[in-house]
Amino acid sequence: VNGILGAYSGQAFTPLLSFDPTNTGSGAPRPDIVGDPNRAGPVAANPTCVAPTQIHTLTAWYNPCAFMVPPSIDGVQTATRFGDAGRGILRGPRSTNVDLSLFKDFQIREHTLLQFRTEVFNLFNHPQFGLPNMTTDVQGAGSITGTNGSSRQIQFALKLSF
C-alpha cells in the first residue's frame, strides 16, 4: 500500500485592472485598495459598486468593491498614478488531494512473479478549483470558472517478472 497526501493553502495572486490607466504600456497595472477584499458587503470608499453578500464562493471569491481605478493626476482620465494594491495580496482556494496504490505479488514459479496493481488518483474525487478572475474592474471579477487537475482516475496493471 502506498499513499500520497497533498494539501495546499491556496496560491497567492495579484488583483489587476483590465486597462492601462497610466498610459505607460506597463501591462496589467494594479488598482488602489480601498477596503478589505476578504469581507463581504459594501465598501464605504466605493459606494457605487454592488458588493457580494458572501465571499469565498465560486461566484465571488473576493470582494471586487475593495478595489478601484486610481484617480487621475490631472483631472482628466488620460494620466493616472499606479495603484497601491500589493503583489500577491489575495489567496486562491485551498486544495487537498489523496492518491493511493495497492500492490499484490503472486509467486507463479521459483523465478516468475506476477504483480497486480491498482492506482487511484484523486481518491476522494475532490474538485481542485482554479484561481478566480483577477481583473477587478470587469463583470465577473472574483468568480472561479475553471478547475486544475482532473477527477478521480483508476488504473489497473499486471506486471510479469521472470
Image: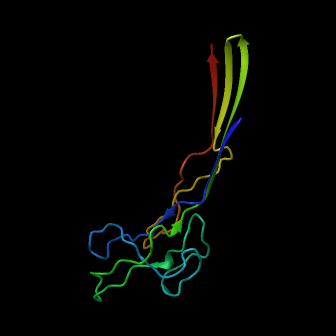
Q: Can you see residue 86?
A: yes
Residue extending furthest toward the bottom = 75
Q: How is the image coloured?
A: rainbow
Q: Residue 151 at what x, y percent from top left?
A: 60, 45
- Is 130 or 100 nearer to us in this picture? 100
Residue 29 sits in quarter: bottom left
Query: Horizontally, is 106 left or right of 129 in the view?
Result: right
- Measuring from the top left, give residue 34's x and y in whole percent: 48, 82
Residue lying at 32% horizontally and 76% vertically, measured from the top left = 21
Q: Residue at x 33, y 80 (%)?
A: 81
* Above or below, comparing residue 2 to residue 74 in the picture: above
Q: Is residue 94 above or below residue 139?
A: above
- Name of the residue lying farthest toward the front: 110
Q: Quadrant of residue 93?
A: bottom right
In the rendered image, the quadrant that contains the N terminus is top right
Q: Is residue 25 left or right of residue 32?
A: left
Question: Which image quarter is the C terminus in?
Answer: top right
Front-most of residues 143 and 101 = 101
Where residue 55 sits in the image (x, y, percent)?
A: 60, 71
Q: Nearer the viewer, residue 42 or 72?
A: 72
Residue drawn at x 44%, y 75% is 85
* Residue 132 seen in render: no
Q: Residue at x 58, y 53 (%)?
A: 128
